[in-house]
Image (tube, rainbow, N blue to C red):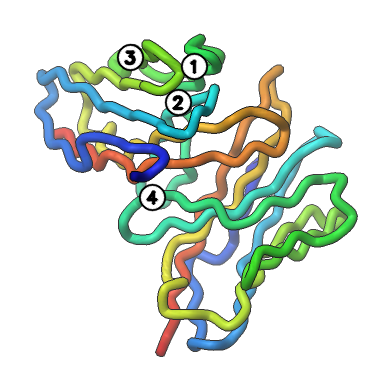
Amino acid sequence: ETGVTQTPRHLVMGMTNKKSLKCEQHLGHNAMYWYKQSAKKPLELMFVYNFKEQTENNSVPSRFSPECPNSSHLFLHLHTLQPEDSALYLCASSQGGSNEKLFFGSGTQLSVL
Amino acid sequence: AQKITQTQPGMFVQEKEAVTLDCTYDTSDPSYGLFWYKQPSSGEMIFLIYQGSYDQQNATEGRYSLNFQKARKSANLVISASQLGDSAMYFCAMRDYSGGYQKVTFGTGTKLQVIP
């Protein structure tokens, strides 16, 4: 069993659809993150949750709505997305501390038509 | 200014040879950490190696070593004895304080291809 699991692996949606991405970590970590990875661009940090509390929202449009019901689960709710939102969405978790390393899931490849 | 710069979009290396992937960084925070991650075609980002800004010695993890030159603000990854399974994207990242939070910033990556 991998440490960080993301579902679905692939998602195709229309601009009027509503969908959710799910992330679950089995590592007992306290922090969870959403990153967006677009072609030829650095990974962009979207949201950070520490102990279920959102500690960072990196100027993400409101059509992306995160939810963290507990330290092990993280969701990203999507609605009325744009084609430029097509990307790989990566979830990560970490224990905490200045030298903490991130543990990533395999990502959800999202295509918005 | 870019916080993390990886100037090599792509690299080729012969199997069993060593390769160096470049990374330079920019921060005013005296306490920071540098990371390298590997991303195979499956998509998952895999942690490889970490270097703290106050660490006196270069970090090593098996075939991976980090050539840390603090004055030049560079943190190059050296992979020795390349294997076919090393073919992947490699990302340099830095954790520092920015805007009151610890943040991890990633570079644009280097695609490494190992040739048999």
A78 w.r.t. B68: above or below? above
Which amino acid is tagged 3? Ser
Distance between the alpha carbons at the discs numbered 1 and 2: 6 Å
Nearest to the eye among marks 4 and 2: give it.
4
Q: Secondary structure at mark 4?
A: loop
Q: Is residue B61 left or right of residue A81?
A: right
Instruction: Provide residue B59's location: percent of width, then percent of height.
Output: 75, 59
- Identify the residue under disc 2: A46
Which amino acid is tagged 2? Met
- Identify the residue under disc 4: B44
Distance between the alpha carbons at the discs numbered 4 and 3: 23 Å
Residue at image x 42%, y 79%?
B84
Distance between the alpha carbons at the discs numbered 2 and 3: 10 Å
Quadrant showing the C terminus of chain A: top left
Q: Secondary structure at mark 3?
A: strand
B57 w.r.t. A74: above or below? below
Which amino acid is tagged 1? Asn
Q: Chain of mark 4?
A: B
